[in-house]
Structure formats: C-alpha cells, structure tokens
Image (cartoon, rainbow, N blue to C red):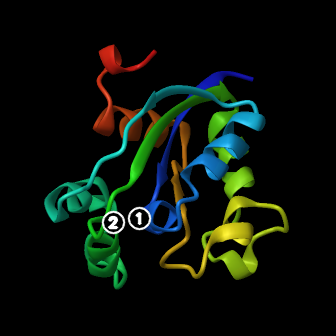
Amino acid sequence: MAVERTLAILKPDCVRKNLQGEVLSRIQKAGFRVLGFRQMRLTPQTAGAFYAVHRGRPFYDGLVEFMSSGPCVPIALEKENAVADFRKLIGATDPKDAEPGTIRKLFADNKGENIVHGSDSPENGRIEVAFFFSESDLV
C-alpha cells in the first residue's frame, strides 16, 4: 500500500464541545502521523472555496455557514492507505448510519454537524492538504 495524505478538519461543533484532544488522540492511536495542525476560523469565502465542489447542492449554503460559525482545526495526516482508513475511523456522514465506535457515532449530533471532515480520495487528500498547508508547513 502507498503512503497517502489526507485532510481532517475538526469542525466547529467539535471545537465547541471541546473534543479536539479526544478526537486527535483517536486519530493518532489509529496510526496516523500528524504533518500539520492549526486552529483557525474560516471566513464564509474560505469555507465556500474549500467546499466549492458542492456549490449548487441543497446543503451548500448551510455547510458554508456552519463551517464559518466558529473555530475549526485542519490537520494534515499521513499513513499507508490514509484516505480509506480515515474514512473508516470517522464513520458514515450521518452518525445514525455510522458503525459503533467510529468518531461520528460517538460524538456527532447529526448529518450536518458531524464533528470531522475527511478527504474522499487520495487526489483530493493532496489537494485539500495543500489548501490549508504549504509544503514548508508540514513536518
């Protein structure tokens, strides 16, 4: 298996619930290496640009509003099979459909406020990491 990069974003609901440490601990225990980590507040413009692929979908405006509603924590991660392994770790987008023990099953309230973002492909993992981190930011 190839070493891949993926982006996690601890979303505003995760920060509001003060779960950043708990979620990061689970990520690290699953074997992910943290390459970059920062807490920031997305502007509506930045959130809109990041989620531009969803522009025009019914949930887009609510997603942009939510992601710019408070601080979030983008995290660049690396591991063999990182994208698939991370998506398995976090669980289905809707926590009621997520497997027991996954991050979303344990901590998310609903499909719209689901604690964490994860890249959906190795290509998007590279693109999304680069959206938040330059190569010189990554350790």
Q: Is residue 8 above or below residue 109?
A: above
- For badge 1, the amino acid type reads Pro
Instruction: Give the left or right position of residue 15, taking residue 46 as reference.
Output: right
The answer to which of 104 and 86 lies nearer the viewer is 104
Of callouts 2 and 1, which one flags the residue occurring earlier in the amino acid sequence?
A: 1
Q: Is residue 135 above or below residue 10?
A: above
Q: Regarding mark 2 in the picture, which secondary structure is present there?
A: helix
Label for residue 22?
none
- For badge 2, the amino acid type reads Met
Find residue 124 and report its image quarter: top left
Which residue carries the number 1 mark?
12
Q: Residue furthest front?
A: 18
Which residue carries the number 2 mark?
67
Q: What is the C-alpha distance between the residues marked 2 and 1?
A: 6 Å
Q: Residue at x 67, y 21 (%)?
A: 2
Q: Residue at x 26, y 65 (%)?
A: 68
Q: Is residue 48 above or below residue 112?
A: above
